[in-house]
Amino acid sequence: MNPPWAPAELPEWIAWVGQDANGWWWGFEHEPNAGDCGWYENEVGRYLKLTESGPSPDWCDTLQRVR
C-alpha cells in the first residue's frame, strides 16, 4: 500500500513511513521497530503522526523508506 502523499510533501527529516493497524500513517527519522500493531521509534530520532486512512490488516507490509 502506498501512502496517500508524495515524499516531497513530507518534512525533509522523515526518511521512513509506515501505517499502523488502526490506519494512522507515521513518519520516522530513522528506521522504526515493529510492535504488536504498529511501528515505533527506535529510541533515536524524531517521529510524526501524519494522517489516517482507515484500518490496515496488512500494516506490517507498509513500512517504506522515502529518502
Image (cartoon, rainbow, N blue to C red):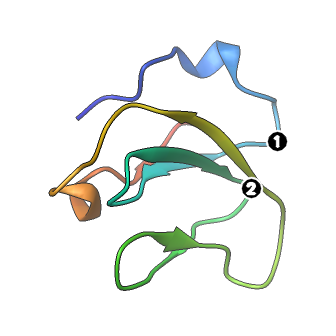
Residue positioned 82% across, 42% down in the render: 13
In the picture, the disc for residue 29 is 2
Assess disc 1: are there few (<14), some (14-19) or many (≥20) residues with their C-alpha within 10 Å of its C-alpha.
some
x, y percentage for residue 65? 49, 46
Residue positioned 26% across, 64% down in the render: 60
- Give above or below for 1 relative to 29: above
Residue positioned 38% across, 31% down in the render: 53
Q: Is residue 53 left or right of residue 27?
A: left
x, y percentage for residue 62? 31, 50
**Mark 1 residue element:** loop
Count of numbered labels shown in the rendering? 2
x, y percentage for residue 46? 83, 60
- Give above or below for 43 relative to 1: below
**Mark 2 residue element:** loop
Residue marked by disc 1: 13
Q: Is residue 58 left or right of residue 33?
A: left
Q: Are marks 2 and 1 in contact (CB under 8 Å)?
A: yes
Where, quadrant-wise, is the C terminus in this rendering?
Answer: top right
Asked where in the image residue 45 lies, by quadrant, the reply is bottom right
Foreground pick, 54 / 38:
54
x, y percentage for residue 15? 65, 46
Furthest residue toward left: 57
Which one is earlier in the sequence, the residue at label 2 or at label 1? 1
**Residue type at tag 2:** Glu
Q: Is residue 51 left or right of residue 11?
A: left
Assess disc 2: are there few (<14), some (14-19) or many (≥20) residues with their C-alpha within 10 Å of its C-alpha.
many
Q: Is residue 52 left or right of residue 26?
A: left
Where, quadrant-wise, is the N terminus in this rendering?
Answer: top left
Residue positioned 38% across, 46% down in the render: 23
